[in-house]
Amino acid sequence: MLRTHHCGELRAAHIGQKVNLCGWVSKVRDKGFVLWIDLRDRYGITQLVLNEEISNEASLKIARSLGREFVLSVKGEVIERESKNDKIPSGAVEIRVEDIEILNPSKLPPFTIENDTDGGEDLRMQYRYLDIRREPVKEKLILRHKVAQLVRNYLSNENFIEVETPVLIKSTPEGARDFIVPSRLNENQWYALPQSPQTFKQLLMVGGMDKYFQIVKCFRDEDLRADRQPEFTQIDCEMSFVEREDILTIFEGMTKHILKEARGLDMPKFDRMTYADAMNLYGSDKPDTRFGMSFNYITEVAQGKGFGIFDSAESVIAINVKDGNSYTRKEIDKLTDFVKSQQVGAKGLIYCRCNEDGSFKSSVDKFYDQDALDQWASICGAEANDIIFVLSGDKATTQSQMSELRLHIGEQRGLRNPDEYKALWVLDFPLLEYDEDSQRYHAMHHPFTAPLEQDLDKMESSPGEVRANAYDMVINGVEVGGGSIRIFDKDLQSKMFSLLGFSKEDAQAQFGFLMQAFEYGAPPHGGIALGFDRLCSLIGGTSSIRDYIAFPKNNSGRDVMIDAPSPLNAEQLKDLNIK
Amino acid sequence: MLRTHHCGELRAAHIGQKVNLCGWVSKVRDKGFVLWIDLRDRYGITQLVLNEEISNEASLKIARSLGREFVLSVKGEVIERESKNDKIPSGAVEIRVEDIEILNPSKLPPFTIENDTDGGEDLRMQYRYLDIRREPVKEKLILRHKVAQLVRNYLSNENFIEVETPVLIKSTPEGARDFIVPSRLNENQWYALPQSPQTFKQLLMVGGMDKYFQIVKCFRDEDLRADRQPEFTQIDCEMSFVEREDILTIFEGMTKHILKEARGLDMPKFDRMTYADAMNLYGSDKPDTRFGMSFNYITEVAQGKGFGIFDSAESVIAINVKDGNSYTRKEIDKLTDFVKSQQVGAKGLIYCRCNEDGSFKSSVDKFYDQDALDQWASICGAEANDIIFVLSGDKATTQSQMSELRLHIGEQRGLRNPDEYKALWVLDFPLLEYDEDSQRYHAMHHPFTAPLEQDLDKMESSPGEVRANAYDMVINGVEVGGGSIRIFDKDLQSKMFSLLGFSKEDAQAQFGFLMQAFEYGAPPHGGIALGFDRLCSLIGGTSSIRDYIAFPKNNSGRDVMIDAPSPLNAEQLKDLNIK
């Protein structure tokens, strides 16, 4: 071992000990007669001190030649620091250096290795190995490790078995686009990388594994948006002989446990909300419930007063902002610009101020008298000093626009506190979505999701109304993951494939192995998958998942550090019979 | 929850309780007036009993209709079993069934779901989900989980951080063949799947991560041999500011810990042996040291006696088999056939019996008198009743052939006890191997391995003699893994690339990011990678790694269960611009 201690562990109790430390030069202060060096490693910073009395000439010469990020090995004695630094745990002591050795010099880094760096994102990604030396990045990777350990130990204690499922699997055109891998040993045949281990975990249930989990890499060849990575990590789970309640209980427990252990925070019991309620109350299947401002439908009272825009609308939706009457005209104009932006796409924003004196002042006073506005206020539960905002149009679009406005106002008014965690289960999703382009139903979750038992009789007559026994975990407006009770009956699974437009042959070719497995005693089962990158970012209290990935790819799917993907040489392609 | 207990947990203490169980029908015994069912799940087997007195008619009717592997839900009372079964933990009780429900029927499985099945390997792989229901397969997967948990908790306690490295990386022609993945967003460019996270873990060390580990999937597109999988799992580790001894200590400790916790076995301290000694004493860089029979070089005393075969040989190598004089003529003929087989390739086998009375009887008595044979015996430490076997030829070939013979005899004589664990570190491997085909040196481990400091001066003059600061962990003749102290100096790394025949441009194109990283303060570092599949099989006491993989591929790299790889549709290939 090149060191006796690391840079984060020396305390007053070590005073008088001879130690060896290794690390990186974080800072040098040369006062001429005395010279201090901050030596840094993963664990912390320890101050080194050299001066002409205590240090030999060679060491002083080396110390004066040091640049930032040089790698050092030093020997010396732990002494009490004259002016202690309360901000770091090792701030009570320093090392009186007797000997110093440069293990490796460093060129000047392209950005400063400090908490607040001067490096832009592109530069930091190109030199990600330097970025990782920075405290905030390093701490995020350590948090990720900690969360993974907590998940594994929690689930292992609950009798789950982690089983590794294969990475080289079979392509299935259903769902997102697969990454594919040519097989050299099987000409003109291809593997695909898994979008999730869905079918394998179901086969493990058929195999009697009872409780399965895996923290596993998954792959989707999608056009990348901000914060979408072509490879991402999932906490993947499946259980046999369970009902929905069992799965919700286990994974609510796990999530609370992680937040408690990783952050010391207690989470309240998760709320439950149907998909229908979530859409009606918040216009979103992943509502942020840290704050109110739920939707009020004032369609009936708002129509028939001569205001054409409301009269022709399918829905008129209002939210009440507590104490919002303090908004200035200018601020309301800005909100109007927001809802009219391309991102939201509304045509305009109606407001109604609730004055201190009980009177109302709206942007549509021409059509609505005080009594009419009082009706709005009463439906919205608005009181003096509040403000009501109204949007209208077709129901689904207006819900979605109002959801954006609600989140925007919540953000503005500091109602989305990153240290508060409010979770809910969204339940009873629709089983199917009709897609106009392909003129057929698509599975809202995936083709293995079971319908709610009470909706089974609608499978033929009105498939669009069938609800799924599916659930999403939503925390602070972020969909952390979701799952469902699965179909375990081969006939129901066939019916599902046929609803999704699979011919018998296609279903057989793609999922024949699963259908066959269901003939040999498949148990009732269900599961869940949580986005691990996202869960970590949520627990860490930041919004970017990229920060929690050691070597992320950019929006074009490139790793700019190693410069991948890259062209291949002709021989490699020839071996694979590819042009 | 569809059950109150699982099938492995009911004991005498539960007698009188009403319970619900779910599981698979393992066996039905119908005695007419009474009927027993063995109900099985992952946790065990519980006996159900139905008879005309206690069970309703419907239940009896269902019970009589059951086939093997039907999935049941049953309700009943735990009662004391009349004839207890000591062989299973739940053998003191049975369930007096009140109600029985078939959750799912099953077709007759293609092989019996029992410890000793009648299913051949191909059939079991095709129906792997049924194979997994079998106790021995299930237990192996559970052991794998347990070992993974032990590794992770051990290394986490030692301050290692598990960091996920990317799966979509860059192809490097050095080493084995890569699996490649076309990039749709970057035309004519390709990702590669990692053969190991080698460069990433070194970059993490440059990034100050200090102690890294990962249990990680790796990929090699090799022509498959028995027990080679295109995707395999590795325990991958790297540490900074360490010397060889630090790494050996940690991973020897980890291995002992796992064996103790997973199997209750204590392992003796690992031996240490140089590569040179391993080759000289055992003719193998992964010697099985559970037994002796090390090599004796009798070249000098065996030559010059007129026996042409020995006279023309570079080396004459003898092993002594304790009490081996009991071999019959026929048995010796069989051993001769063995060494002459294609697998071994020797021309013949010379023996020398050490008789009870102190005389010798050899197959080359024509050339060697009693005194000459006494010299052999004395070099080999042979005593009365032993037998000496001799092979000759060029040194390397003879060592390798004798190694095969030694292992074969060890196996025959029961010296390779699967419940005994004997480990050693093989040290000081050659840094480079000269490859006649490509007329250049190849890295024996990989291009990042550091040379031993004392051999540095031979790097230019006689690179073939330079030893590496590399080490392999060998247990019972199996190479569990290996590693090295790495080069962390950019100039030495450049020199290494040039020895390996890389042009400056090639080295830059392939490893430029690593060379660049080394300019910004790379710490001294080293690491190790252990084959996780192999380690599990070793701990489990069986030789096939395939048994420890949930969904393995066959020797053509096929998953015969899901039938992958498979042809793609034209559209997928068009999207990727591939023919």
Image: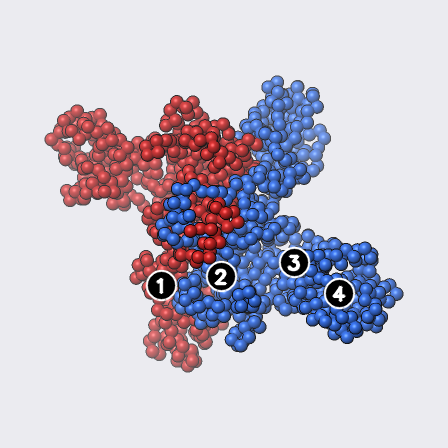
Chain colours: A blue, B red
At horizontal 18% and vertical 27% (from top left) the residue drawn is B311
Query: Toward the viewer: B349 or B388?
Result: B349
Disc 1 sits on a residue from what chain? B
Q: Which mark is residue B113?
A: 1
Left or right, A234 with respect to B334, comes to: right
The residue at which mark 2 appears reads as A174
Q: Nearer the viewer, mark 1 or mark 2?
A: 2
Q: Nearer the viewer, mark 3 or mark 2?
A: 2
Label 3 sits on a secondary structure element that is loop
Q: Are marks 4 and 2 on the same chain?
A: yes
Disc 4 sits on a residue from what chain? A
Whether residue A63 can be seen here: yes
At horizontal 79% and vertical 73% (from top left) the residue drawn is A306
Query: Toward the viewer: A355 or B44?
Result: A355
The residue at which mark 4 appears reads as A390
Left or right, A31 with respect to B72, comes to: right
* Distance in Å between CA atoms under marks 1 and 2: 33 Å
The crowding category of the residue bearing disc 1, from other C-alpha atoms within 10 Å (few below 14, some 14 to 19, many at least 20), is some
Q: Amino acid at mark 1?
A: Ile
Left or right, A553 with respect to B339, comes to: right
Q: Amino acid at mark 4?
A: Val
* Distance in Å between CA atoms under marks 4 and 2: 40 Å
Residue A351 at x, y percent in the picture: 79, 63
Residue A218 at x, y percent in the picture: 51, 53
